[in-house]
Image: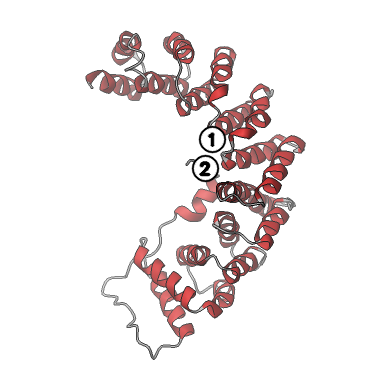
């Protein structure tokens, strides 16, 4: 399942977490160590890591499950500043995995505290969205954060909350939760009432994260928007909604789209849907004339993926392998022909 994320959000969870320094040995685990001291020991071990350690993450999660009274202490430990950013990422993830009401309250406290690192607040917002069984308070918190767009930092948190609501809504939908319609309707309303293109795109990404095909009409209308960024986001969201019924429309729009970057997204969307002959014919007829390298690469990928059912593309791919000005595209076409 593909989900929308932003650059800041990737940064929030993609930084590596720490490995033992040379010669460091784990703190012995004995029954004589108090739960709070053991938590400190686990965090200290995280602080000296320079790469991810799934076993240590599970150990921390298990300790918090076994001693839920420690969850209330997590925000204080993070706020004190003694925990590295990488270690904090693992701590917040462990709290998310615990997922209990106490864990959710800890995440809510972290995201709402201006004294916490901005990155940790964003991580906590994302973790609220990733919960398997979010409480009403967690969902209400995400809506509250999504509504707060005062300055740069709050806009970042707001964007994260919108995307988190989409992720959370998807889980609730698949779980048959009665809470799903409220999230779905709220995000669709945000999409249609957004006051600027940036907010509209974020709301559209959140709707895409729901992966609910019933919402395709709400999104596909924006394929005709005057702004290229909105059209790109609409194409991405249509793909995530699994809206195969719109592939013909996207293929037709591809013919008249003036922006190369948007054409590339339209083809990428077609690649995510079931291929049909009309779309293949349109792409086949355009690929040799496509000037935008990324759009041309997407077209070649599309033809390569469907070469078995559309053999007439073989001669075109041979021409591309011989003469395309972009090395990556020549290599892609050549590799397909050698299979």
Q: In which quarter of the image is residue 338?
A: top left
Q: Where is residue 110 in the image (x, y as percent from the top left)?
A: 61, 67
The residues bearing labels 1 and 2 have C-alpha atoms spaced at a distance of 8 Å
SS of the residue under disc 1: helix
Q: Which of marks 1 and 2 is nearer the N terminus?
A: 2
Mark 1 is surrounded, within 10 Å at the Cα level, by few (under 14), some (14 to 19) or many (20 or more) other residues, namely many
Residue 55 found in image quarter = bottom left
Q: Mark 1 points at which residue?
A: 240
Farthest-out residue, left: 338
Mark 2 Cα-neighbour bin, 10 Å: few <14, some 14–19, many ≥20: some
**Residue at the (52%, 55%) spot, across then down:** 12
Are discs 1 and 2 less than 8 Å apart at CB? yes
**Camera-side residue: 262 or 192?**
192
Viewer can see residue 55? yes
Secondary structure state at the residue bearing disc 2:
loop
Give the tally of numbered discs. 2
What residue is drawn where x is 53% and y is 45%?
A: 7
- Identify which residue, 152 or 52, lies in the foreground: 52
| Image location (x, y in percent) of residue 270 | 49, 23
Residue appearing at x 59%, y 38% in the figure: 212
Viewed as shown, does residue 93 lie left or right of 310? right
Quarter of the image containing the C terminus? top left
Q: Which mark is residue 3?
A: 2
Residue 76: horizontal and vertical position, in percent?
A: 59, 76
Q: Which residue is drawn at 39% across and 71% down?
A: 59
């Amino acid at each position: 399942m593909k989900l929308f994320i932003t650059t800041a959000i990737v940064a929030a969870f993609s930084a590596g977490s720490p490995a033992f320094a040379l010669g460091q040995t784990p703190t012995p685990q004995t029954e004589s160590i108090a739960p709070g001291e053991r938590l400190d020991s686990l965090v200290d071990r995280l602080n000296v890591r320079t790469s991810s350690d799934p076993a240590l993450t599970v150990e921390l999660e298990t300790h918090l499950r076994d001693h839920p009274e420690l969850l209330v202490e997590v925000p204080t430990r993070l706020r004190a500043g003694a925990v590295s950013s990488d270690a904090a990422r693992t701590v917040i993830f462990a709290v998310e995995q615990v997922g209990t009401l106490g864990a959710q309250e800890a995440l809510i406290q972290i995201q709402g505290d201006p004294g916490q690192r901005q990155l940790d607040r964003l991580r906590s917002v994302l973790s609220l969205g990733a919960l398997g069984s979010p409480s009403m308070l967690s969902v209400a918190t995400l809506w509250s954060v999504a509504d707060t767009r005062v300055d740069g930092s709050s806009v970042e948190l707001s964007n994260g909350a919108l995307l988190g609501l989409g992720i959370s809504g998807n889980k609730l939908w698949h779980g048959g939760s009665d809470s799903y319609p409220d999230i779905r309707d709220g995000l669709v309303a945000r999409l249609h009432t957004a006051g600027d293109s940036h907010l509209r795109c974020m709301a559209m990404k959140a709707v895409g994260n729901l992966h609910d095909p019933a919402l395709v009409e709400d999104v596909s209308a924006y394929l005709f928007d005057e702004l290229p960024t909105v059209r790109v986001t609409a194409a991405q969201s249509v793909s995530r909604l699994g809206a195969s019924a719109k592939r013909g429309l996207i293929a037709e729009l591809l013919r008249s789209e003036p922006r190369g970057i948007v054409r590339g997204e339209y083809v990428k969307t077609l690649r995510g849907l079931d291929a049909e002959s009309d779309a293949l014919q349109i792409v086949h007829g355009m690929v040799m004339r496509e000037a935008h390298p990324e759009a041309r690469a997407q077209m070649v990928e599309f033809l390569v993926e469907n070469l078995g059912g559309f053999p007439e593309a073989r001669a075109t791919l041979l021409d591309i392998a011989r003469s395309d000005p972009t090395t990556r595209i020549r290599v892609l076409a050549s590799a397909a022909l050698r299979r």
